[in-house]
Every structure is written in C-alpha cells, then in structure tokens.
Image: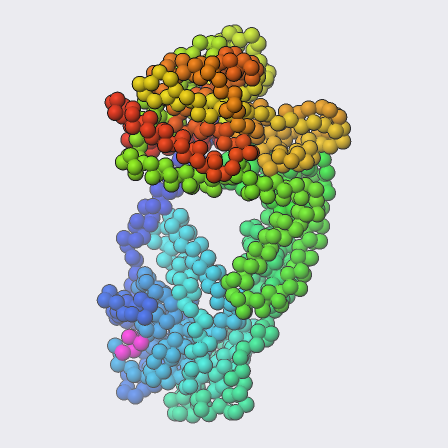
C-alpha cells in the first residue's frame, strides 16, 4: 500500500465516524420532533386542556396541563395554589402538602414545559405561566386563591397578581426570586445574555447528542433554560411595588441561589410584607417542610380572615423606606454555589479572551458582586489551566497538527515559527514578555510545548507570570470600575461598546508602543489599511464586482464572459489546468519552460521517474519548480534545490502537480488580448516583478531588518513565514538576502508598472503566441527573460504560466497607482472581456452554464483545501 493511500485512509476514518455520529443525531432529532413524548399523569393527577399562550395572546391550539387537586371541595373553602420553581414540578410540594390540613383546597400544577404537562410550548416565561394558571383557575371555578410560590414560581405569582390582582388573596414567597438587581450579575442585559448562552448551549447538546427523546428527562434541559430566557425579570420589581395585598417572604439565610438580601429587598419594596429568615439553604421545601407548612398555613388563614397587613396598613416608616430607590451599594458579594458559578464563568471566559474576562472580574469587584480574592483566583485558574493546556497540546500533538482544523483557524504556521524563534532566542523570559503582547500568547505557549521546554520550568515560570500580571489587571479594572459602572447606568450598551473599544486600543496599540517590534507592527498595520495594494479582497473588490454585475446585465448573461477563451474551460474563470494550457499553447522549448505533469494517483516511484525525465532535458538538474496543476496566487508553489527537498515534496503530493524548469532572470507579467477574427492584438499591461532584498549591517537580525524596511514592514508576517528559520540570524555588513523567489504580489514580490517596455517587436511576438493557441484571446503570460533588453526585443524569455479570464493587469499594484486608476483599469479589462466573449458567441462559441461554473468553483475549493492540508 502506498504512503499516500494509507494517509488517505487515516484521514477518512475520523470523517466516517463523524458521519455516523451525524446520522444518529439527525435520526434522533427526527424521532424527537415526531414524538412529542408528553408523559402520562401520575396516579392521582388530573389533566385539562388550556389554550396556548404566546406573548400576550391566547392561541387556538390546546396545551395539556397536569395538576393535583386535593383537600376540601366545599364552597368557600380557601384555595391554596402551590407554584413550583425551575426546574421542578408539583412533586416539589409533596412534603409540604402532606402537612397541611384537609379543610383547605390544595392545588399544585405542573407548569407547561415541566413535570407531566405538555413539554413543548412557544412561550415558557413566568408571564405566560401566569396566564395558564389563570385559565386553569377559571376552569375550576375558583375566583380567588392564596399563592405559595417557590423559587422561580415567585415570578409566576407576582405576574399573576400584577395581571389579575382581584384573583389573588395573598402571596407567600418561599426562597423566591424577584428583583433582578440581586440575581447573578445584577443587570438585565448581562443576565439575559447568560440565559441566552445557556439556552443555546443546551439546545446544541440536544441537537448533536443522539438521545431519542432522552433530552426531555434532563433535569437541566432546554425547558428550564427557556424558562429563564423567556422571563423578563426586570418587570418583577414593578410587580412588587404595585401589589397592595398581603405578602409573606420566607427565606433561608444560607440560600446560595437566591441571596437572602433579595428577600430583604422584596420586604422593603412591599412595606406590608412579613419577612421570616430561617437558618436554612435554598431548599426549604425539603429540609424544613414542617416550619414552611406551619408558616404558610398561618399566613393563609390570617389573610383569609383579613388579619394580614396590606400596603394600606404599612407603617409610615416602612412606606418611606419602600419609596426610596434601590441603592446598588447594598449589593452583597456572592457566596456559596453562586460564587462558585461566577468563578467558573470567569474562568471559562478566559479561554475566549483572557484580558476581557479579567477586566470583567475587576468590574464585578468594583460593583461589589465579587470580592477581589475569588475574582483573581478564578481568572488566574482559567488563564493557567488554559495556557498550560496549550503547552501540553504542543508537546503531545506536535507541530503537524497546526496544519489541521480546527487549530489552524486560530494558530498559523507562521505565528508558531515566530514564537519558536523567539523562545530559542530569549528563553524562559519570553513567558513574561508574552503576557504583555496580546496575539503572541497562544503561539508562544504552544511553541514551548513543541520545543519540549522542561515542564516544571515552564509551569513554574508561567505561574509566577500569571500571579503577577492577572491581579494587577483585576486591580486596574476595579480601580476604574466605579466610573465604568456609572457610565453603564447612564449609557448602557453604548458605554459597554466604548469600554471594549478602549480595551482593544490598550491591547493592540498602547502596549505595543513600548517595544520596537510592537511599534513597527503598528506601522505595518497602518500601511496595510492606508495603501490599497495591501487591502484584503473583501475591501478592494466590491466596486469591481458591482461593475461586472452591471456588465452582465447589460449583456443579458451572467456567464457570457466565460466564452472569452473557448479553448479553456469556463474561459479560465477558475480551476484551469496549467499543464493543459501550456500544452495547447504549443510554444517551442525556447519560449516555454519545460515541464512534466505528475498525477496525484502516481506512485512515488512514478513521480520520481517523471522528474528525472525532465531533469535529463535541462542543463542542470536543480533548481526545479514544483507547483499544483490547478492553483492561483502562487499557492503551493515550491522551488526545490536538492534531492532531500525533492524526495520530501514528492511524498506529500495529494493533487496533480507540475515539475517545471526553473527559468532565471527578471520576471514579467504581460497581459495580451485579441478580438476574434483579428490578426493583431494588443498588450494591455506589462508588470515588472522585483524580488526585494535585505542588506546586512553586521548587527541586526533578519527579523529586525524586515521590520526596519519601509515597505517590508507592511507584510512582515509573510516574510517571517518565508524565513522562519533565519529570523535570528545576523547578516554580515553588505551581505544580501533575497526575501522572495516567486513573482506573486501576495507572497511578497514588488510589482511595478512596466508598460514603457512595450515595443512593436514585443507586440509581434505575443501576437504570434496568441495565434498558436487556437481559442485563446484574453489573458496574462507570466514569464522570465534573459534581460530587459532581450525582453523588449521580443526574444530570450521563457513562459512560466498562461492565465485566463480572472488574471489581472497586475501593473496596477505598482505603489504609485492611485486607487481610482486601479479600479478603472480592471473595469476596462472586464469590459473588454465581455466584448470579446460576445464576439466569440456570435462566432458559435458556447458560454459555460451556471452549473458548470459552480462545479469548477467547488472543485477548485477542494483542491485548495488539499493544498492547506
């Protein structure tokens, strides 16, 4: 079995496993959605159908509502409605209910989405649940009821009282949530964001885990998450302020989910409230059922008899206290499991952005939500564990994994090579420096593992670095926190966006100003955004795309332009074969660089034989060029200079390649076009491709010389990648280092406008070349010449490639070319392409179909992925 075949099998089996998993997940979800799986009632339960609630409206669809109804059915018997929390069900009240007398009518529902009621409803909010309860009570003929509400059930009780106060005789909040200022982060936007993230996470789990309905039995399932996401807890303070009837608040002093300070705030906002605090946790219904039952019964009887206080009965002192606005300085620091939850959130947040999570911790310290020590411990733990994981990944997985998804999305080979060189040069001090340079942390720690830095040394030094840097950042954020909180209160999301922008400016700009490398990196970034030749395609091409679209509408065909070169599939739009074009060109050896096609299916021995045949025709066996048969912008092109490089390259080929003669001399790009039926064409563009050099001074490293160069600094990362192994090398005074060998702008070559080199002799030479290739009218020749003089005379050059429709008049990338001139030139190029295509169509040429174009595009993308792999 060949090496490439075995590698192919090793790469296919994970995808086969993933495909099996995906098939099971799809089957699971199809089964889940076609089998709602609403559970059967328990013995003794009853079931009724209510109208679905969606927002404020009642729909036409029925919703199955499960409940338990026991105790007295005598007319006038007090009704006690027990509202459970989330997650929960009516069984949460079993211990309480068995301690209540039978002269009360005890009603306990499973709210929709929970227990044995219908699982799937459009709205899981407390407000919607309140409307379900109202419908249910109407159906039972109960005009008025006392509410005992546990945890999230408190929100349902308050919403029901706010909607229909005449239906509520009293409210007894048992470890219940209410005002949002004392929940989690204390802000509706942040809390809601967390609830949304929780819902998305749980929904994703139900989609990707094959459960076949088992997700409905998860305690922390999607209905629990939707309950919190759909509920607008910011309304509940208003509900409390508007409630005039009897209110009791029972809470555990050691409640870790809803802090006891929330109960105290509820009692302050409602001055008629009776507050009782027990030495208990959140789970009073299970740990203290006797006391809860006694207090609930006593309060309900007094409320029924009119003996419980209403808002009108509140003392003037408590009424005045209730009128005061909420004071955020009263916010208690988180404790118990809530503290643990916040610490876990911060620690996980450092895996996304260490600095942002640390600054968020500082703001929570300033707010009083967290104390300094646990906030710092959480951030330090997250940073240390996450980055030690990078170190171990580098050690265990090694360098090749960087070329594979998903790691290559976050860590480039170039960044890893730079970090490796930095580590070799500066050693363990790099760990401290990387804390100050965002963007270098991930590659530095991964590189430390790849280079097998001693584990204890790295772990120890890194721990010291984390313990120094992280507390300082938390302190800094806490110091600014009071101002930030005031801005949040005043400006909300605008202030948050402004703070994030400020943090990014500090990270990306201010810190970099303290180092030479950072200052030059900022200079390079400035050049990349202010000099259009370095712009990314998404920024440069939109105006041109719009113009090409207009041309297509004008000519009434989006694919007409593919007829510009009938001899090339899709006219050379994408995915054209270099070998097929060079063969069809039929140029003599003195005009075209000699080559051999190497199929991907060939064995290593067959590949070696083809290269040997080529080398036998050449004056010298090396260097030779190895390039993909389908590719653009120099992707995958290598210049091989010895046997070792050749053997390694031949073993790695996964797509069809060309082994090609290396042509020395200056390189040019000549864009030539000719209308069908005409003997003479014209040279539209000539580009001279210059290969930049560094000149040593005897003291500066290659990296420093690149950064000092006024142009090279703009694409320093490209040059760093090409010379990763020499960045620490000091060039002798006067010693020269050529930075690139390929005439590709995106890979570092300098393009200059050389249209002045056009001569009648050169025009005749390319007219003759164009006529050799039947069906070719429009494209760019990439070639190397003996000298500029020979090139002007139309002789002494070797054609490397011939590109079709999407090749460009690359002289526009001359730094002296204005942006508008570049757009104008490319616009004219495409206008001519459409006109030549229209002439070809009139002569019988068939433009490619949209399906054919898309097929070529998808095929090219597959080839490009293989290049990266």
Q: Is residue 342 above or below residue 258?
A: above
Pick whichever, 755 or 670, lies toward us.
755
The residue at 51%/35% (across/down) is 404
Which residue is at the front of the view, 386 or 725?
Answer: 725
Q: Residue furthest left?
A: 60
User: What residue is shown at x 40% (from left), y 81% (from top)?
Assistant: 100
Specify the segment rendered in magenta: 134-138
Q: Is residue 105 left or right of residue 522?
A: left
Q: Would residue 392 be found to the left or right of residue 806 on screen?
A: right
**Which quadrant: the N terminus?**
top left
Residue 145 seen by the camera: no
**Foreground residue, 400 or 563?**
563
Q: Position of residue 667 (x, y in %)?
A: 54, 21
Rendered location of residue 326, percent (x, y)? 54, 77
Q: Residue at x 34, y 70 (%)?
A: 128
Please determine whether, in this image, residue 455 is positioned above or below residue 628.
below
The relative height of residue 66 versus residue 622 in the rendered view (above or below) is below
């Amino acid at each position: 079995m060949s090496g490439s075949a075995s590698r192919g099998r090793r790469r296919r089996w994970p995808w086969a496993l993933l495909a099996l998993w995906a098939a099971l997940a799809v089957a699971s979800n199809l089964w889940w959605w076609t089998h709602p799986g609403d559970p059967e009632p328990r013995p003794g339960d009853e079931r009724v159908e209510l109208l679905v609630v969606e927002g404020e409206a009642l729909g036409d669809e029925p919703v199955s509502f499960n409940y338990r109804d026991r105790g007295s059915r005598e007319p006038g018997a007090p009704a006690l409605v027990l509202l459970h929390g989330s997650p929960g069900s009516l069984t949460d009240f079993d211990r309480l209910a068995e301690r209540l007398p039978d002269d009360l009518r005890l009603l306990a529902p499973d709210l929709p989405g929970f227990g044995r009621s219908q699982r799937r409803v459009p709205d899981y909010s407390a407000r919607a649940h309140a409307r379900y309860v109202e419908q249910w009570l109407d159906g039972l003929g109960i005009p008025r009821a006392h509410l005992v509400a546990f945890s999230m059930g408190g929100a349902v009780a308050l919403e029901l009282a706010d909607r229909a106060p005449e239906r509520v005789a009293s409210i007894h909040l048992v470890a219940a949530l209410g005002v949002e200022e004392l929940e989690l982060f204390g802000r509706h936007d942040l809390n809601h964001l967390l609830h949304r993230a929780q819902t998305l996470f749980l929904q994703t789990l139900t989609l990707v885990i094959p459960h076949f309905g088992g997700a409905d039995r998860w305690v922390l399932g999607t209905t629990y998450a939707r309950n919190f996401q759909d509920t607008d807890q910011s309304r509940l303070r208003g509900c409390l302020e508007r409630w005039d009837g009897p209110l009791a608040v029972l809470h555990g002093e050691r409640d870790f989910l809803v802090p006891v300070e929330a109960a105290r705030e509820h009692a302050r906002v409602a001055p008629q409230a009776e507050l009782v605090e027990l030495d208990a946790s959140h789970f009073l219904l299970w740990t203290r059922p006797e006391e809860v039952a006694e207090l609930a019964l006593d309060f309900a009887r007094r409320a029924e008899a009119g003996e419980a206080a209403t808002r009108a009965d509140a003392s003037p002192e408590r009424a005045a206290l209730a009128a005061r606005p909420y004071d955020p300085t009263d916010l208690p620091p988180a404790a118990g499991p809530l503290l643990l939850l916040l610490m876990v959130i911060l620690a996980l947040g450092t895996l996304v952005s260490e600095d942002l999570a640390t600054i968020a911790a500082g703001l929570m310290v300033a707010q009083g939500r967290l104390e300094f020590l646990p906030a710092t411990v959480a951030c330090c733990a997250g940073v240390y564990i996450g980055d030690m994981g990078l170190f171990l990944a580098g050690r265990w997985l090694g360098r090749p994994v960087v070329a594979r998804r998903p790691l290559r999305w976050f860590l480039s080979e170039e960044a890893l090579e730079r970090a490796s060189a930095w580590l070799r040069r500066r050693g363990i001090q790099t760990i401290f420096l990387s804390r100050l340079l965002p963007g270098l942390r991930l590659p530095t720690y991964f590189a430390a593992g790849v280079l097998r830095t001693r584990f204890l040394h790295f772990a120890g030094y890194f721990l010291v670095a984390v313990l120094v840097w992280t507390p300082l950042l938390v302190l800094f954020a806490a110091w600014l926190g009071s101002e930030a909180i005031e801005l949040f209160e005043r400006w909300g999301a605008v202030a948050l966006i402004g703070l994030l922008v400020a943090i990014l400016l500090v990270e990306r700009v201010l810190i970099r100003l303290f180092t030479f490398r950072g200052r030059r990196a900022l200079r390079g970034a400035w050049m990349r955004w202010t000099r259009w030749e370095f712009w990314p395609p998404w920024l440069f091409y939109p105006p041109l795309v719009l113009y090409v679209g207009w041309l297509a509408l004008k000519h009434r065909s989006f694919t007409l332009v593919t007829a510009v070169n009938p001899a090339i599939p899709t006219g050379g739009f994408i995915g054209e074969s270099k070998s097929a074009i060079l063969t069809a060109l039929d140029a003599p050896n003195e005009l075209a660089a000699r080559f051999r096609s190497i199929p991907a299916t060939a064995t290593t021995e067959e590949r070696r034989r083809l290269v040997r045949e080529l080398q036998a025709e050449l004056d010298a066996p090396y260097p030779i060029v190895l390039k993909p048969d389908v590719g653009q912008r120099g992707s995958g092109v290598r210049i091989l200079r010895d046997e070792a490089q050749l053997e390694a390259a031949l073993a790695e080929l996964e797509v069809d390649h060309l082994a090609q003669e290396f042509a020395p001399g200056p390189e040019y790009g000549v864009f030539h076009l000719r209308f069908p039926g005409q003997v003479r064409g014209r040279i539209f563009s000539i580009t001279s491709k210059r290969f930049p050099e560094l000149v040593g001074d005897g003291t500066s490293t290659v990296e420093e010389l690149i950064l000092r160069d006024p142009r090279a600094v703009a694409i320093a990362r490209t040059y760093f990648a090409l010379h990763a192994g020499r960045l620490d090398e000091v060039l002798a005074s006067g010693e020269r280092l050529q930075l690139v060998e390929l005439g590709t702008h995106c890979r570092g070559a300098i393009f200059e406008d050389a249209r002045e080199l056009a001569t009648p002799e050169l025009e005749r030479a390319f007219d003759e070349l164009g006529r050799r290739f039947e069906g070719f009218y429009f494209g760019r020749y990439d070639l190397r010449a003996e000298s500029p003089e020979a090139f002007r005379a139309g002789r002494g050059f070797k054609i490397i490639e011939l590109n079709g429709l999407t090749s460009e008049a690359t002289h526009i990338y001359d730094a002296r070319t204005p942006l508008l001139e570049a757009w104008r030139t490319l616009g004219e190029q495409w206008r001519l392409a459409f006109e030549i295509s229209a002439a070809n169509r009139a002569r019988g040429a068939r433009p490619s179909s949209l399906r054919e174009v898309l097929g070529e595009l998808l095929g090219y993308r597959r080839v490009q992925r293989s290049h990266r792999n």
